[in-house]
Image: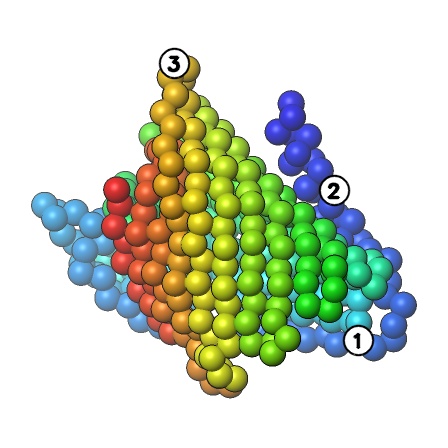
Amino acid sequence: MIKKQLFLFSCVALTFISISLPPRSAAQDLTIVPALELRVEYDDNLGFDQKDERDDFAGNAIPKLTLDYKTELLDVSLVGELDFLKYYNETDFDRTNQLFGFDGRYRVFSRWTLAGNFQYRKDETTDTQLEETGQVVDRDRVKTYDAGSGLLYQLTELSDLGLDFDYRKRDYSSDDDTDFDRYTFSLPYTKKFATQRDVLTFEPAYTIFDSDDEDVTDYRFGVGWQRLLSETLTSELEIGARYTDIEDPDGKNDDNIGYFGELGLIKKGETFSGKIAFSRDIRANSDAEIIEVDRLLLNFDKCSVFLSCVF
């Protein structure tokens, strides 16, 4: 009952953001960007099966629409994307992925800002699990719902204190995989240096993970440091400690203490953007098991490579 109320609270907060009163300023900026990406792919092992390797060519069409609306008080972004993949021979692997999202911020008072976001993603476990955990699993359709709301208070010109709530629901089409719900509360404090080149973040967080196979409670505290190395290059460092308690259906508990972190570089230019990062954290696989994952991310515009090691 409590978890349903928490999810309802998040939905109400998001609704408030989306129907906020019209801004008191006449200055407005509306940007609508339609896009279409077409490409041809070759896959030498469609099912990730060493005993039954099947290869094929495929055509990929990705129409996308982005809408941004900005005023002095309100900043809203909407995105919609469809991903059509059609194979020449192996038509059983044809699929259509969907992505719809909303992100909004509204400055209620001079120091108070409300924020909210929602994203719906429909794809396959071969995409989701390979990206998140590095595990190769049986192909299954999966729906992921992400929602969040937050309240930010500007303490000074250089520091902020926030209160955030995030919710994730993962729903698999097959009974062989395990659905789960995740609820996270966090209290981030951000401090900028006078030079405006360095930003420190201190963030305690509390997470509840609920599934039919196990219930997980996670307590953590992280410290982040972001530094502007140049006008186009930024470094990011985060490190923290966690205490995780896992309870199985029989009521047996398994608790452990660990650490998490991420080290990365972000490059942004007028015609080019990219990110390289290494991270360690716990994640949920398609069986709703909590596993520790080391992950190397290489992302350059539309080209992405994920290398993961699971413990």
Across and down, in percent, residue 170 comes to: 48, 39
- Up the image or down, 176 lies above or below 150; here it is above
Q: Judge from the rendering whether residue 166 lies leftward or rightward of residue 161; answer left or right.
A: left
Which numbered tag is attached to residue 250?
Answer: 3
Q: Which residue type carries mark 1?
A: Gln
Residue assigned mark 1: 28
- Up the image or down, 210 lies above or below 66; here it is above
Across and down, in percent, residue 200 comes to: 55, 63
Is residue 188 in view? Answer: yes
Q: Identify the image quadrant of residue 24.
A: bottom right
Q: Which residue type carries mark 2?
A: Val
Q: Report helix, strand or loop for mark 1.
A: strand
Where's the N terminus, which quadrant? top right
Across and down, in percent, residue 4 comes to: 64, 29
Residue assigned mark 2: 12
Q: Residue furthest left?
A: 51
Residue in the picture at 74% in, 64% down: 156
